[in-house]
Amino acid sequence: MTECWSEGKLRAFIDRELPEEDIQRVAAHLEECSECGDLWAELAGRADRVSALMHELAEPEPVVAAPRRARRAGPMWRWVGAAAALAAGVLIGIVALHKQATQVAVAPPAPLVVQTAAGIAEPQADSGTAHNVVTLAAARPAQAGSSRRNRKPTAPGLQTNNPFLALDDDPIETGVVWRVELGPREVPAEVIVDSDGRPRAIRLVNFKPNH
Amino acid sequence: MRDVIGSVQPAEEFALTPAEGSGSASRRVAGARLEAIFREHYPRIVGLLARLMGDRGQAEEIAADAFSKLAGRPLLLQDREDCTPWVYRVATNAGLDAIRSNSRRRRREEEAQAAILHAGAQSDALNEMLRAERRARVRAVLGALKPRDAQLLLLRASGLAYRELAQTVGIQPGSVGTLLARAEAEFERKFRARYGDDV
């Protein structure tokens, strides 16, 4: 009969934590030694029982688990769908407003008077701004007045709804709005500059000439 | 007074540049080693403690505290073989101390059992109550074991191999089987002594 194995080796044999040749030797010994066979059975049974109890601890805590079970995936997808639809709507609205604003401000160049103050004095313009690079005529195209800025309360001497005045007849497709100040009185204005760096339209911002 | 102050040399003149340099280098090494150990073992320690205590938040607190203590021991950090078992031992001991005197856990378990009784099917509530009771018993017995025995059982239940167990607990790989068998025997003996044969 082969030699008996220690309790520790038998326990490692149960977990298959012995070298392969030792596993073969222990298995062969257990077939011929009832005493070691009994010890192996006792160790294996205890290991199973203790392991089962220890695994009880791995279960989720019921207080935490209960509200999680109540959650479903449905509302999440509905929120995602609603958010996507809202984003698409906002995007379409922005594009439509952009097109409309471009048409309103730029399309009717005829009523607009954009003049260099060096040569032509503007009858209704503030004399203080007359020598500036650009002054505005009083005549403006009728505005739709749908801009949100139109509804803001207007302080005396200020206005918020000047249209952009085209500086040439070419259509403006894209551009960047620059905030500038004109002349020694630093009259605030906005200039649309296209991708070539050419100013295409201008408007005064928050300024109303005193009459 | 002016003379006294005037005779005091600026602090940087006393600085020993070579010693300062080597000190900062060793601090960098210790910091890097601490970070490596933290990355490798923090999740496992939190899992072990959460299993032991049934409270993941508290487990994270204790694990973080153990690493904080390790950070304050630069000499220990110089030897990774020593500091890994050390941080496991500190964390496990703190967890065992906590379950021995954790009134918050007991109160939470009582509240959980009450909540279960008020919600769900009666059979589910009964099963959940029984499981909660078993969990409480296992924790109580673990708290009564020697820290190393409890540590071995918890880590083995977490799936660590013998080689990892030996490295983590700081024992010889060849003695893992023996110590594990003894820990299981002691656990079962204490469990039976407290709760009868219903193991």
Image (tube, helix red, strand yellow):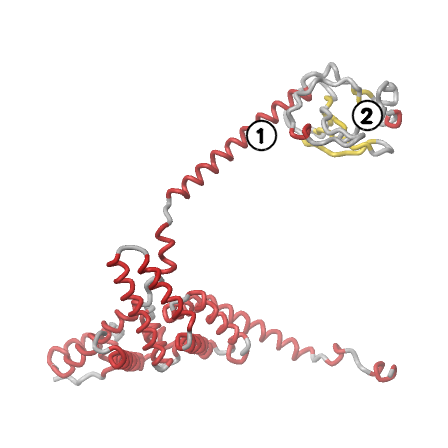
Residue A94's disc number: 1
In the image, residue A71 sits, relative to residue B9, either above or below, namely above
Q: Is residue A36 left or right of residue A82?
A: left
What secondary structure is marked by label 2? loop
Q: Is residue A53 left or right of residue A104?
A: left
Kind of residue sitting beneath label 1: Ile
Kind of residue sitting beneath label 2: Val
Dot 1, crowdedness within 10 Å: few (<14), some or many (≥20)? few
Residue B23 picture quarter: bottom right
Identify the subunit bearing mark 2: A
Query: Where, quadrant-wise, is the C terminus of chain A in this rendering?
Result: top right
Front residue of this view, candidates B9 and A183: A183
In the image, residue B43 sits, relative to residue B192, either above or below, namely above
Q: CA distance from mark 2 to mark 1?
A: 30 Å
- Residue projecting furthest to the top: A110
Residue B158's disc number: none
Q: Which residue is mark 2?
A: A134
Q: How far from the left and from the top, in percent, is residue A207?
A: 79, 30
Which residue shows up at 71% across the image and 24% down it?
A163
Residue A195: tell me if it is visible: no
Residue A186: tell me if it is visible: yes
Residue B196 picture quarter: bottom left
Q: How far from the left and from the top, in percent, is residue A42?
A: 18, 78
Q: How far from the left and from the top, in percent, is residue A138?
A: 79, 19
What secondary structure is marked by label 1? helix
Query: Where, quadrant-wise, is the N terminus of chain A in this rendering?
Result: bottom left
Mark 2 or 1, nearer chain start: 1
